Amino acid sequence: MINRKEIIETIDMVEKEHFDVRTITMGISLFSCIRDDAEKTATLCYDKICKKAENIVKIAGDLGNEYGVPVINKRVSITPASLLTASFSGKEIVLAKALDRAAKTVGVDFLGGYSALVHKGMTSFEESFIKSIPEALYLTERTCSSVNVGSSKSGINMDAVRLMGKIIKESAIKTADNDGLGAAKLVVFCNAVEDNPFMAGAFHGVGEAETVINVGVSGPGVVHHALKSAKGASIPELAEIIKKTAFKITRVGELMAREASKRLNASFGIVDLSLAPTPVMGDSVAHILEEMGLESVGAHGTTAALAMLNDAVKKGGVMASSSVGGLSGAFIPVSEDIGMINAAKSGAISLSKLEAMTSVCSVGIDMVAIPGDTPDTTISGIIADEMAIGMINNKTTAVRIIPVPNKKVGDGVEFGGLLGSAPIMSVSPYGCAEFINRGGRMPAPIHSNKN
């Protein structure tokens, strides 16, 4: 039973500590829509999304009102689109436009799954699909894209890494009027998960049910507030406070996820307990780390503090739900976290320090703005480094990086909304083109051979 104290705590978390359900995401299998014609496939995909997700916005609103916890985003994820377009290579844009129309019709904020899985190899139709991504992101508003180029089991597809450096650069150039916004809707993964409710990397995995509800719960402000009362506490005491707080947050997410699944006639998938920040003051992962005792995020000790935070969040979450999944941990996007934004502006944090932090937290180099004239091979090098961290450590890592056209180090960029703002961060002036252009597949680590 939920008692009076817990109800009051939840009200305080919402009103004073920025607690929310960040997203209710409906995953929809579109395998039944595949035809050998682009228009037929696109039409069937549009119809199925509109039918399955027609009530997601209303029901999310109803749940937010009934439980007193706001649902910020309503989203849809689909079967990786490259699997739907195999028979009509070169006409992928027809599907991209239909997906975006469907997202607008049902009223969701984003649709994820314009995606390809090429971690071990890349077919000709997948290469054609990936090359369509910049145009797809330019012509659509709510469609998001991701490409998985590595895994701990298969190694890293360096041909795909090389190609993605070019695709990110082209996506930014095509959307230069919006400061390269296209690249902000594109993620490159190692060990991508199939039940991620967060954008831009969500897609509906091939092993999932017909329709699934995955919920992302976020509460950096709640954790930060809890730690404010722990001045002088030891590290184990801090970890215990974070675990208990994560437990409370996850219980709310579990309740709303199961009710949303029931009302939307979909399977209950997972609760993703990720501390996903926003640019709003009081909703920052960086400020949690600083509350632990760092003068600024980026100081020596940051990686250790983040490791403890991430571990405690996961431990608290799994005690509250048997279905914790997705990414679950702490996100460290630069432009979407007010503390990270300020640290980047002051020079307290660099791209190299961010890379080190990604070895112990959820995802990776996220929403980082770099100079528009950065060579595509350098972008590929950043991707390769991050994929290697994921492959060796058997964890999900990702790169969402924006080479902002016509901007240089010292400039800033304003994306608006949850995407926030960011200073242009410097990259290494030393090239890696010869290494990137070697291509081929980087072998998987020895510990991948577990059978």
Image (cartoon, rainbow, N blue to C red):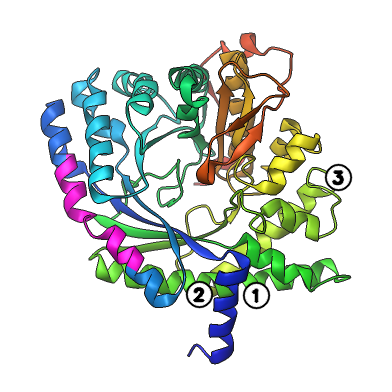
Q: Is residue 125 visible?
A: yes
At horizontal 18% and vertical 40% (from top left) the residue drawn is: 45
Q: Is residue 101 left or right of residue 313?
A: left
For mark 2, what is the residue?
Answer: 251
Q: Are marks 1 and 2 in contact (CB under 8 Å)?
A: no
- Label for residue 244? 1
The x, y position of residue 246, in whole percent, is: 60, 69
* 411 over 307 or under it: above or below: above
- Local secondary structure at mark 1: helix
The x, y position of residue 181, in whole percent, is: 48, 29
- Helix, strand or loop for the magenta stretch, by majority: helix
Question: Residue 409 appears in which quarter of the rendering?
Answer: top right
Q: Are marks 1 and 3 in contact (CB under 8 Å)?
A: no
Whether 48 is among the magenta residues is yes
Kind of residue at badge 1? Lys
Extent of the magenta region? 45-61
Mark 2 and mark 3: Cα distance apart in space: 34 Å
The x, y position of residue 208, in whole percent, is: 31, 53
At horizontal 59% and vertical 21% (from top left) the residue drawn is: 379
For mark 3, what is the residue?
Answer: 300
Q: Are marks 2 and 3 in contact (CB under 8 Å)?
A: no
- Label for residue 39? none
Labels 2 and 3: the sequence-earlier one: 2
Question: Observer-nearest residue: 145 or 441?
Answer: 145
At horizontal 21% and vertical 48% (from top left) the residue drawn is: 49
Kind of residue at badge 2? Arg
Residue pushed farthest right? 232
